Amino acid sequence: NAGVTQTPKFRVLKTGQSMTLLCAQDMNHEYMYWYRQDPGMGLRLIHYSVGEGTTAKGEVPDGYNVSRLKKQNFLLGLESAAPSQTSVYFCASKGVNTGELFFGEGSRLTVL
Amino acid sequence: DQQVKQNSPSLSVQEGRISILNCDYTNSMFDYFLWYKKYPAEGPTFLISISSIKDKNEDGRFTVFLNKSAKHLSLHIVPSQPGDSAVYFCAAVWSGGSNYKLTFGKGTLLTVNP
């Protein structure tokens, strides 16, 4: 039982490049989330999903896209990376009958 | 406009003493509150939560208190241990909505000195 797994763990991009972060959960959770953590800013919600095939914008969605084609996976895409997107990204999931979110270990992205 | 505020960026306490971490919120719709603990290079882990129908919830060394009229909650750790040194995030949510979204504070770095 791996819980929430994020790949890759580390990535360095050049400005303008694109990439996708993959989040996979094996807990059969309905809800999935992408947060970013920046120094002094806490955790800010980028996008989330309340079920397979659904996505919604969070607090800081600009510059990101997401897809939830399968219940267990939630993809976060950067079409044209910018230095402002340098951050640590956390994926999380939640079951219907639980209150807490379960987080992955994070993906550190650096955009040069 | 921060809806969840942790006004102390850091806190230092001696091992064995009490640690008190504070959190304020502005959105009166919030009815469920959570504390997360985060070590460097790891994801946040759930610690304890409280529903707005309660004013206290206890789990071992950790107790969360909720003062709804003041829109304030606090996490008490007694006794504090060096392994408790981490960043603590307060989070809040309106559990009755169809879109369950946690709003986090900026976190408080707790250092427990041996």
Image (cartoon, grey):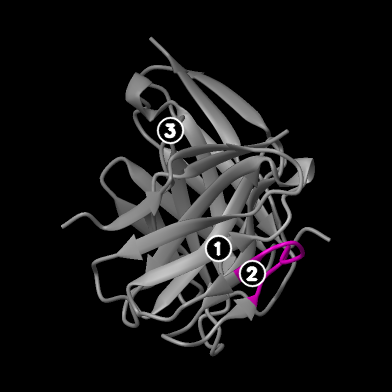
| Three-letter amino acid code of the residue under disc 3 | Tyr
Q: Residue at x 84, y 61 (%)?
A: B1
Q: Residues within 10 Å of mark 2 (few under 14, many from 20)?
A: some
Q: Main secondary structure of the magenta part?
A: loop
SS assignment at label 2:
strand
In this view of the protein, can residue B68 be seen by the observer? yes
Q: Are marks 2 and 3 in contact (CB under 8 Å)?
A: no
Q: Chain of mark 3?
A: B
Q: Identify the residue position indicated by label 3 in the image.
A: B39
Q: Is residue B97 left or right of residue B16?
A: right
Q: Chain of mark 2?
A: A
Magenta span of residues: A57-65
Q: Nearer the viewer, residue B74 or A60?
A: A60
Asked if both marks, 2 and 1, belong to the same chain, the answer given is yes
| Residue B34 higher or lower than B111, as above or below | below
| Three-letter amino acid code of the residue under disc 2 | Asn
| Residue A88 higher or lower than A32, as above or below | above
Q: Are marks 1 and 3 in contact (CB under 8 Å)?
A: no
Asked if both marks, 1 and 3, belong to the same chain, the answer given is no
Q: Residues within 10 Å of mark 3 (few under 14, many from 20)?
A: some
For the C terminus of chain A, which image quadrant? top right
Q: Nearer the viewer, residue A31 or A16?
A: A16
Return the disc, 2 or 1, that comes first in the chain's sequence: 2
In this view of the protein, can residue B54 be seen by the observer? no
SS assignment at label 1:
strand
| Three-letter amino acid code of the residue under disc 1 | Leu
Q: Identify the residue position indicated by label 1 in the image.
A: A76
SS assignment at label 3:
loop
Locate residue B111, reporting x and y percent: 50, 21
Q: CA distance from mark 2 to mark 3?
A: 28 Å
Q: Identify the residue position indicated by label 2 in the image.
A: A65
Which quadrant holds residue A96? bottom left
